[in-house]
Image (spheres, grey):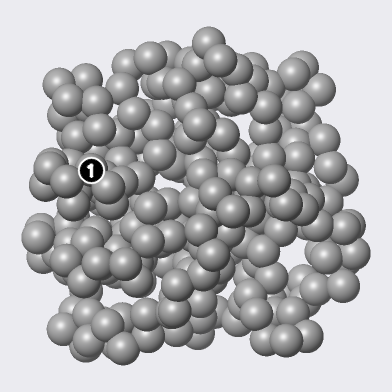
């Protein structure tokens, strides 16, 4: 239930507002996979540096890992989260000349990475970082960047991801912690009580369960890596799928109420934290 996941100032109004602003469906992410993946560099350079822009990491996926690729939930999740942020907060979002949210795709070796105060990776359980990519990611994070890694499930994906992120931030220096709900990130705008386990919409509609890996993913976790000043530089939502809650928000009222509403509250908190720390 929504109330178990978070408490909000004016929570009823929040839900009502969200129900009235659901965007019309966009083309499916699958239709975008073979299309243009990386915008021209000018897509960032011409945008408003003071406004929020959604940046997604394009990365290689290893068949030995557990992930379906960087483009899962792309681009609907990117656009919808940007729109909801602008509607739920006073945060300005970067817009195209047509008024659409600016969302860009960057690789870890792109210079434009450093123009993104916030980046997201989906299904990082199969990510395969080169030494150059790991070094660039480390520089980005320790210079003030923020990474949200979402939608990876089970022990195999966790072990793989732990190794890959460890190439950039070795655990001996930067241990992975379970982020307590008392952390400021959980109270930026909405008061978060726990992290909901969000399944992909197909699993929910077919079986009404939330665990995508059965006993190997019994509950959702919020984990983090902090820099030496105590700032969260990597936020990880493990055994849960926030991207689907953003992407598929308009396809099922039940899925929306149960999963998209709390997901947007947490998403707003994450972005506000990333933009202010």
Residue at (17, 25) in percent of width and height: 214
Q: In which quarter of the image is the C terminus?
A: bottom right
Which residue occupies 43% across, 60% down?
A: 247
Is 127 situated left or right of 90 in this image?
Answer: right
Q: Is residue 250 above or below residue 225?
A: below
188 shown above or below 206: below
Quadrant of the frame with the N terminus: bottom left
Tell me what residue is drawn at x 25 percent, y 67 percent: 252
Q: According to the image, label 1 marks what residue?
A: 203
In the displayed structure image, the side of residue 93 where residue 193 appears, left or right: left
Secondary structure at numbered mark 1: helix
Can you see residue 103? yes
Total labels: the figure holds 1
Left-right relation of 183 to 224: left
Q: Quadrant of residue 259?
A: bottom left
Q: From the top left corner, tell me how far across and down residue 199 is, in percent.
A: 26, 45
Tell me if I can see residue 227 in this picture. no
9 shown above or below 78: below
Q: Quadrant of residue 265?
A: bottom left
Q: Determine whether, in the image, residue 139 is placed left or right of residue 214.
A: right
In this orientation, which residue lies closer to the viewer: 75 or 115? Answer: 75
Nearest the eye: 66 or 133: 66
Q: Pinpoint residue 107: horizontal percent, then vertical percent.
A: 76, 40
Q: Name the quadrant containing residue 55.
A: bottom right
Q: Residue at x 54, y 65 (%)?
A: 27
The 10 Å Cα crowd at callout 1, few under 14, some 14 to 19, many 20 or more, is few
User: Where does the image place residue 87, in percent across and percent down from the top left?
Assistant: 45, 84
Residue 150 in the image, given as x and y percentages of width and height: 44, 41
């Amino acid at each position: 239930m929504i109330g178990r996941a978070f408490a909000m100032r004016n929570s009823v109004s929040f839900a009502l507002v969200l129900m009235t602003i659901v965007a019309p469906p966009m083309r499916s992410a699958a239709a975008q996979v073979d299309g243009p993946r990386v915008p021209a560099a000018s897509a960032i350079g011409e945008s408003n540096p003071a406004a929020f822009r959604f940046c997604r990491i394009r990365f290689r996926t290893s068949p030995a890992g557990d992930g379906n690729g960087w483009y899962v939930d792309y681009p609907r999740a990117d656009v919808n989260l940007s729109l909801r942020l602008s509607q739920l907060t006073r945060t300005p979002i970067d817009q195209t000349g047509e008024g659409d949210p600016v969302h860009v795709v960057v690789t870890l070796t792109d210079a434009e990475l450093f123009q993104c105060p916030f980046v997201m990776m989906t299904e990082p359980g199969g990510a395969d970082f080169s030494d150059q990519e790991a070094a660039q990611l480390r520089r980005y994070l320790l210079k003030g960047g923020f990474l949200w890694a979402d939608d990876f499930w089970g022990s195999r994906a966790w072990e793989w991801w732990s190794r890959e992120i460890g190439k950039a931030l070795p655990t001996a220096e930067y241990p992975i912690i379970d982020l307590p709900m008392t952390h400021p990130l959980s109270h930026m705008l909405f008061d978060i009580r726990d992290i909901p386990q969000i399944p992909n919409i197909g699993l929910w509609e077919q079986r009404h369960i939330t665990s995508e890996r059965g006993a190997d993913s019994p509950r959702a976790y919020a984990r983090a890596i902090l820099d030496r000043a105590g700032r969260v530089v990597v936020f990880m939502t493990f055994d849960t799928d926030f991207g689907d809650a953003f992407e598929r928000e308009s396809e099922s009222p039940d899925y929306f109420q149960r999963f998209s509403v709390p997901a947007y509250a947490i998403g707003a908190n994450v972005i506000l934290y990333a933009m202010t720390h």
